[in-house]
Amino acid sequence: MASQEREDLIRLDLLGHAPAANLMLSEKIKELLGSGRTVYHLAFGQSPFTVLESALESLALNACKTAYLPVAGILELRKAICEFHREFDALDLEPGNIIVGPGSKQLIFLLLRIFNGDVFVLSPSWITYRPQARLAGHEPIVISTEYRHKWRLTPDILDRALKKSSAKNKLLILANPDNPTGTVYSEGHWKDLVGVLRNHKVIVLSDEIYGRLTFSGNHCSLAKCYPEGTILSTGLSKWASAGGWRVGYHAYPPALRSLLNAVTNAASNTHTCAAAPMQYAAVSYLSASEETKAFTFHLQRILEAVADYCHSHLAEVGVKAVKPLGGFYMFPDFEAIRCALAKRGITTAQQMCDTLFEEVSVALMPGGPSFLRPLEELTVRLCFVNFDGHGALKASEAVGFNNPLPGDFVEKYCKLTAEGIQALKKWVVTQKNSVS
């Protein structure tokens, strides 16, 4: 006899709760790639670069470390984190205010599970913030940002949104550089916002996982401008090319010590600690060595070249997007071909992405509800990192620090990304010509 589904086993507010859309799509595409199909995978933000040799050596040396470690992370690593951010971000952090976990995502979830108050997320926003908040028992309040402001929060937008909440405690989650838009907040932008944050006594979870990948090299942490209210969230997944190592960390301000203690207690009852070998290996990454500085320099200029290539070629055919200033992403809007798509019965970003994949094998993530955008909006998240990072890194190193990358660098060393953009560009032109 066939077994019956038991939906009564699931919390009512989580019925129909979906998995992370980016991970599910990436798994599907990997299966197709494994079967030999050519796919231009512009839908998943995994670093293409190789791990630093010194970190690999450290990992091998510490593979024998099997003991449980302190819940907050080994002191050696927490000290390295403080020195790292003192050197790169001019932050004065203390080891006792740092917690290391198996990825920053886990630490964000524990914070949300413990936090007592209203949670605010932006639109567009990284796809996991709202699902995590819901898993943790919150229904987050969405603050819509606008293209005309380059998808950044403004003081007026923030103030209006915060006034809608009567909660004593408020937690705002944002990313800088941003996922999915590639926008970046400078020190000037933060100074405009800090007055509003202080007035409403807001705690900010500042997700700076892409901080070292700000193309200018001048990343400004919110913790520098709003130290008393910022929880800095970052890790090794993106700039350090070590996503699978699952090493993330949060730095709390002294004023939020009680919250940090509660998160640490929760960590002791859930994940216990981050993996021992990875923690020891992370120490070599989180140093202000010349190796680390050179590594980040090359990554920044390679990604800037690829971002500029993608933005300029799509702009040539009328696809509107904010020019990325950091990270792996841009957030193009295909409004220019809405009429042509509508004649084909395509009215949503999801339908458009499905058609694109079927017709030219370009994989993109639709904007829409996953990124907290309107269903009918024709935005997508485009990830421009599906290239041979090892080859691109070696080519950039050969060029040297004092010389610019050659004009054909992207076509030559980031070939799959360039080919995907050209296939996408040609498809847009085809849609336009169909109604001309």
Image: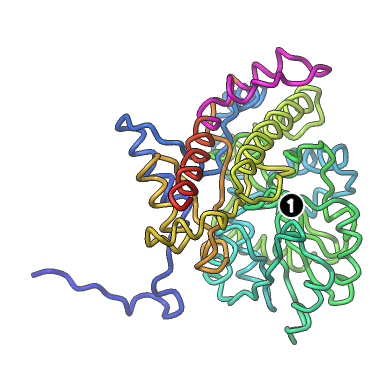
From this view, report whether residue 138 is shown above or below residue 296.
below
Q: Residue furthest front?
A: 436
Q: Is residue 296 above or below residue 318?
A: above
Residue 238 coordinates in the image, percent (x, y): 63, 40
Judging depth in this view, the residue of 227 and 337 nearest the camera is: 337
In the image, the segment drawn in magenta is 392-418
- 338 is within the stretch colored magenta: no
Relative to 411, 219 lies left or right: right
Tell me the amino acid under the disc marked 1.
Asn
Q: Place residue 359 in its image quadrant.
A: top left
**In percent of the image, x 65 and y 72: which residue is there?**
142
Q: Is residue 397 magenta-colored?
A: yes
Residue farthest to the left?
1
Pinpoint residue 150: horizontal percent, then vertical percent.
Answer: 74, 56
Name the outermost residue toward the top.
Answer: 398
Q: Residues within 10 Å of mark 1 (few under 14, many from 20)?
A: many
Q: How is the image coloured?
A: rainbow
In which quarter of the view is residue 117 placed? bottom right
Secondary structure, mark 1, is loop
* Viewer-closest of 409 and 208: 409
Residue hosting label 1: 176
Front-most of 125 and 62?
125
The residue sitting at 52% across, 63% down in the picture is 368
The N terminus: image quadrant: bottom left
Q: Position of residue 241 (x, y in %)?
A: 61, 34
